[in-house]
Image: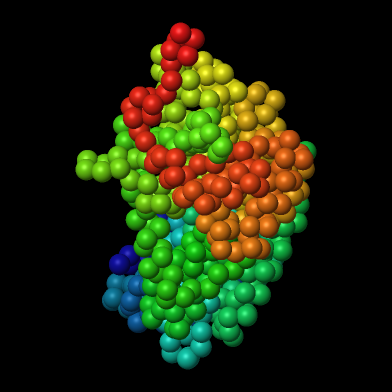
Amino acid sequence: MPKIAGPSALVDALRSVCDARGDCIMLIGLDGRIEYISTSGLKTLEFDSLDSLIGRAWADLWPDAAKGHISDALERSRVGEGHRFSAFCPTAKGSPHWWDVLVSPVRDDRGEVVRMVVISRDITRERANAEQLRWASDHDVLTELPNRRAFEKRLQEATTRARKSGSQVGLLLIDLDHFKHVNDTLGHAAGDHLLRVFSNRLKRRLRAPDFVARIGGDEFAVIVEECVNDEHLRATGEAIGGELKKPIRFEHRTINTGCSFGGAVFPRDAGEAMDLLRNADIALYARKRSGRGGTQLFDARMREEAQRVASQLSLARGALSEKTVEPHYQQKVRLRTEEVVGFEALLRWRSARQYHQPEAVDAAFKDYELATKIGALVQRRVFIDLRNWLDAGLLFGSVAINAAPAEFLRDDFAERMIERLHHYRIPPALVEVEVTEHAFLNRGSAFVARALHMLHQAGVRIALDDFGTGHSSLSHLRDFPVDVVKIDRSFVCKMTGDYEVRAIVAAVIDLAGKLRIDVVAEGVENELQRALLINMGCPYGQGHLFGLPSSNDETERTLPSRKALVA
């Protein structure tokens, strides 16, 4: 401990050293009053003169919140103990500062404490840097919302409080519908703008006790403490969804999107925080599979379905490739003569031991990325087969290729198909694109319409598959360039024993004929069905009555040669 007996040359030397330091150094008497302050300290504290400080109680310089630290430091130093603390104290002119303060006793030659030395270091910048690092570790930089780390901590705390109080905690997971499509079509800057605007609206919409975080690329989470019931959770979702329906402008364009919600309630749906998160995620996935938009609350039966879907997606990602996809071809025939007029290309994929049908990876066709990948694989394989048939001089009519609604969301389906047709030198008139009515009902229907019109203008025929199973079928015939309607197999199989179904089939055939649209009946399995369809005036059909789907090699062997016909 430094010892200062009184005014002397040593004291003067110490003052010189103190003035040379950048810290604020003071000598405090046992009564707590200031006896000395270094020149640098006077400047740091923004006092104009020594007179305004010397003799003042040191505690008077500090705000009330720090007075406890001051009292404790003085008491310890008087009995010979050092003490260190950090506290906030503005300067004389009101500048905000944080200080790291070390208080040490000063003893005389007899070892008795005669005063105290205080060294205060300005740590404002270091503290701000540390706070910034702490903030960054718990927040998302783009949206300034808490991140997944902070969310999981808060969820643990919320469930712990609810367990003690006997209350409920609601959890909502939010997924922006087709966010990747926004990035792909408008650019990542538009996607970032959407996330920032949505985050700001979220913060304004929620109650003070609710907690919102961004936990993934386009996923958000809301913790609703003191959740009263399911309707409380649904109402929160509806309020948030309403915010996203309001227009969002970016560079003179409007971003249209929506959101889907999955919810779960603690402790009803889960006994632990992480189980609550998993079950809310299962509910969200169920919502997206059954149709985006709205709120789906967790039900235990969803877990098995989620596992099935996850298994299918994993299988599709790992198994489907150029080497495993092998389209099979089902004949389309003229019903009266059974003359083959074309084919429908059906997805088959091959593992080491067997061929698999699309149902094995059904979930993949509702996934934007996987559906696009599978569609591209099928198109390339079909066009390679068609090119080989054309080069061999074989006649095959036309070939229909199915397109899932998700394939249109990138808004370049037509351009990519036309590019592939040109690459493989396939005349567009030899190709049909089959879409279901569901493609016109989902978000992105405008992209479907644009693609079909572009393909139709290029010479590709458009077939409306599963006709009559969706909604507003007649308006689809009016608004889209439909060349072919395909009567769904569910009508064909029932029409022999159900007069009303038979009347519907007859009406479709009659309407299509008046609109100069071709009709193909799917699922023709027996001669009675064929005879009824012929009597109704249906020109074309396909089904097991005329043959099972076959591989490229098997199909090729059945195709007539142009040269043989000429001869």
**560, above or below 200, in the image:** above
Residue for point 44% across, 28% down: 382
Report which quarter residue 453 is drawn in.
top right
Q: Position of residue 159 (x, y in %)?
A: 44, 80
Q: Is residue 54 left or right of residue 161?
A: right
* Residue plotted at (48% across, 20% down): 395
Residue at the far left in the pictured view: 353
Residue located 35% across and 24% down the image: 557
Work out whether 431 lies above or below 291. above
Front-most of residues 403 and 297: 403
Q: Is residue 398 above or below residue 221?
A: above
Q: Is residue 325 left or right of residue 46?
A: left
Q: Residue furthest top?
A: 567
Q: Position of residue 381 (x, y in %)?
A: 41, 28
Q: Nearer the viewer, residue 166 or 175?
A: 175
The quarter of the picture where residue 275 lies is bottom left
Residue 549 in picture, x, y percent from top left: 40, 39
Q: Is residue 191 visible?
A: no
Q: Point out the image quarter for the N terminus.
A: bottom left
Looking at this view, is 492 or 40 the one in front? 492
Count the marks.
0
Q: Position of residue 202 (x, y in %)?
A: 65, 63
Seen from the viewer's position, the closer of residues 357 and 550 is 550
